[in-house]
Image (tube, rainbow, N blue to C red):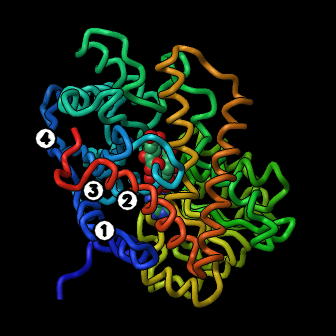
C-alpha cells in the first residue's frame, strides 16, 4: 500500500471539517488541488567561481479570498509536495483569521548554513528573478519561514524593485524596518500564540505557572520562550536541530537566547546553571503543562504521541502533529491549539505590514499589538465556540470556521470556472 503523503494528511482535515457543514462538493473538490505550482532550477555563482544549482518552488494554492500569501523556506529537505501542503495550510490560516488573502508558499532546496552571506544573497535574488512574474502586491506576497529572515526579505524586496523599476515594498512582508517592515513582525508568530493561550486560559483551566517544553528554538521558539518566561512560566526543556536541554527548576532563557544570538546550539549551555542534556526525542515526553512544537512537520506522530504529558499543545510550527497523533492526543485528553490558528500571528502582522506599505502610513508598536490581540482573541473565541457547539477538537473547529468562509467566497465567485485571475 502506498504511504500517505503530507498533503494526503492535510486533506484528511478538510474532509473532517466538510462533514460538519453542508457544502457544495465542487467547493471541496476545488480545495483539494493547488491552483498553480511553479518549479525552477536556480543557478548561482559560488564564491570559489563554480556554479551550483538549487531546486525552488512557488505555489499559489487558492486565491479566492485575495492574493496568495505565505513564506519562503530554505531547507535541504523541501519538496514540491511540502510546499503545496504549506500553501494549503496558508489558505485555511488566512481564512481562519479573516485576512483578505488566499494561500501560497515557496521554498528552495538548500541548507543555507552551508552558504556564505554573499552566496545567500545571490540565491535570494535569483529566487525573485525566477518568480518575479508570479509574485506582486495584488497577486502573491512572500514572507519569511524556516531558515529565512528579514535580511533575506530585504534583498528580495530590493531585487523585485530593480526588476519592476519602482519602489514596491508591499510585494514582500517581514522586511527590515528600514525598508518598510512593520514593527512587531519579528515576534508576531509567537505573540499571536501567546495571546491565544492567555485568552483561553480559564476555558482550558491552565495552571498559573506553567511548565513549558519548546521544540525548535528559532524565531517562533525563542520568542514564545521569552514571552512566557517574562510572565513567570517555567521553560523546562528546549531543543534545536542539534540537541535538547532540560532543567526541572527552569532553564535560563537569557542564556539560551545569548547562545543562539552567537550562532551556538542550545546544547552549548549544558553544564551551566543546571542545564542538562536530554535526547531530542525525549523533549516531547518531558513532564510539562504546555508543549510548543516550533520546528518542522510530523514531529509528533503515532510513535511518540502517547508519551506526551502536556495537557495543552500550542502548534507554532506548521503541521507538527500527524492525524494519527491527533487521535491519540484527543483520546488522552490533550488539547491541541492547531497551527492554522495558533501560529497565525505571523501572517496577521504581515497583513498589517502590507496595509501600512500600501497606505504609506506606519503604526506604532502598541497599535500593532492591540490589533493582533483583538484578532487572535476574536477568532480564537469563534473557534472555541465551534469546538464546544459541535463537540469537535480545536483543529476540526478551526477548519470548519475557515471552510465556511472559503465556501462562501468560492460560491460567490460562481462555480462555473474555478480560475479567478
Ligand atoms: N517565522 C514565521 O513567521 C512563521 C513560522 N511558522 C512555522 O514555525 C516553525 C518554525 O519556523 P521559524 O521559527 O520561523 O524558523 P527558524 O528557521 O527561525 O527556526 C527553526 C528552528 O527549528 C529548529 N529545528 C530544525 N529541525 C529541528 C528538529 N529536528 N528538532 C528540533 N528543532 C529543530 C532549528 O534548529 C531552529 O531552531 C515552522 O514550522 C514554520 O513554518 C509559522 C508561522 C509563521
Ligand atoms: O507572514 C506571512 O505572510 C506568512 C507566514 C507563513 O509562512 C506561515 O504562517 O506559515
Question: Which of label 3 and label 2 is nearer to you?
Answer: 2
Residue under label 2: 407
Residue under label 3: 84
| Picture coordinates of residue 361, whole percent (x, y) | 58, 15
Residue under label 1: 24
Question: Which of label 2 and label 4 is nearer to you?
Answer: 2
The residue drawn where x is 83% and y is 52% is: 231
What kind of element bears circle 3?
A: helix
- Residue 410 relative to residue 418: left or right: right
Residue at mark 3 to residue at mark 2: CA–CA distance: 20 Å
Residue at mark 2 to residue at mark 1: CA–CA distance: 8 Å
- First in sequence: mark 3 vs mark 2: 3
Q: Eyeballing the image, is 359 above or below 302?
A: above
Disc 4: CA contacts within 10 A as few (<14), some (14-19) or many (>=20): some
**Dots 3, 2 in contact, CB < 8 A:** no
**Dots 1, 3 in contact, CB < 8 A:** no
| Picture coordinates of residue 87, whole percent (x, y) | 33, 52
- First in sequence: mark 3 vs mark 4: 4
Q: Quadrant of residue 405?
A: bottom left
Residue at mark 4 to residue at mark 1: CA–CA distance: 39 Å
Which quadrant would the C terminus be assigned to in this image? top left
- Residue 305 relative to residue 42: left or right: right
Disc 1: CA contacts within 10 A as few (<14), some (14-19) or many (>=20): few
- First in sequence: mark 2 vs mark 4: 4
- First in sequence: mark 2 vs mark 1: 1
**Residue 41, labelled with which disc?**
4
Furthest toward the top, the residue is 165
- First in sequence: mark 1 vs mark 3: 1
Amino acid at each position: 500500500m502506498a504511504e500517505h503523503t503530507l498533503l494526503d494528511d492535510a486533506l484528511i482535515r478538510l474532509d473532517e471539517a466538510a462533514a460538519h457543514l453542508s457544502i457544495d462538493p465542487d467547493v471541496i473538490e476545488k480545495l483539494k488541488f493547488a491552483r498553480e505550482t511553479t518549479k525552477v532550477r536556480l543557478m548561482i555563482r559560488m564564491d570559489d567561481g563554480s556554479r551550483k544549482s538549487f531546486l525552488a518552488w512557488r505555489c499559489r494554492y487558492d486565491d479566492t479570498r485575495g492574493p496568495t500569501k505565505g513564506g519562503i523556506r530554505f531547507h535541504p529537505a523541501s519538496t514540491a509536495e511540502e510546499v503545496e501542503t504549506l500553501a494549503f495550510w496558508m489558505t485555511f490560516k488566512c481564512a481562519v483569521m479573516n485576512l483578505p488573502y488566499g494561500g501560497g508558499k515557496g521554498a528552495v532546496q538548500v541548507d543555507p548554513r552551508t552558504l556564505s552571506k554573499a552566496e545567500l544573497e545571490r540565491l535570494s535574488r535569483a529566487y525573485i528573478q525566477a518568480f518575479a512574474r508570479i509574485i506582486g502586491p495584488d497577486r502573491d506576497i512572500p514572507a519569511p519561514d524556516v531558515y529565512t529572515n528579514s535580511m533575506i526579505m530585504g534583498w528580495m524586496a530590493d531585487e523585485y524593485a530593480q526588476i519592476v523599476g519602482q519602489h514596491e515594498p508591499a510585494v514582500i512582508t517581514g522586511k527590515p524596518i528600514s525598508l518598510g517592515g512593520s514593527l512587531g513582525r519579528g515576534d508576531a508568530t509567537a505573540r499571536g500564540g501567546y495571546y491565544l493561550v492567555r485568552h483561553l486560559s480559564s476555558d482550558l483551566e491552565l495552571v498559573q505557572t506553567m511548565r513549558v517544553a519548546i521544540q525548535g528554538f528559532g524565531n517562533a521558539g525563542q520568542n514564545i520562550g521569552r514571552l512566557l518566561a517574562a510572565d513567570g512560566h517555567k521553560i523546562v526543556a528546549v531543543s534545536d536541530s542539534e540537541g535538547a536541554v532540560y532543567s526541572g527548576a527552569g532553564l535560563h532563557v537569557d542564556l539560551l537566547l545569548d547562545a543562539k544570538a552567537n550562532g551556538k546550539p542550545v546544547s552549548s549551555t549544558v553544564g551551566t546553571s543546571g542545564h542538562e542534556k536530554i535526547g531530542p526525542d525525549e523533549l516531547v515526553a518531558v513532564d510539562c503543562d504546555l508543549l510548543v512544537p516550533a520546528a518542522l512537520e510530523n514531529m509528533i506522530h503515532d510513535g511518540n504521541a502517547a508519551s506526551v504529558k502536556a495537557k495543552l499543545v500550542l502548534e507554532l510550527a506548521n503541521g507538527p502533529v500527524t492525524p494519527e497523533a491527533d487521535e491519540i492526543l484527543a483520546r488522552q485528553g490533550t488539547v491541541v491549539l492547531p497551527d492554522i490558528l495558533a501560529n497565525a500571528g505571523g501572517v496577521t502582522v504581515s497583513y498589517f505590514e502590507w496595509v501600512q506599505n500600501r497606505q504609506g502610513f506606519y503604526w506604532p508598536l502598541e497599535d500593532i499589538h492591540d490589533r493582533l490581540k483583538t484578532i487572535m482573541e476574536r477568532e480564537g473565541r469563534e473557534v472555541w465556540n465551534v469546538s464546544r457547539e459541535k463537540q469537535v477538537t480545536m483543529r476540526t473547529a478551526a477548519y470548519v470556521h475557515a471552510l465556511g468562509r472559503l465556501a462562501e467566497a468560492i460560491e460567490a465567485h460562481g462555480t462555473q470556472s474555478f480560475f479567478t485571475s
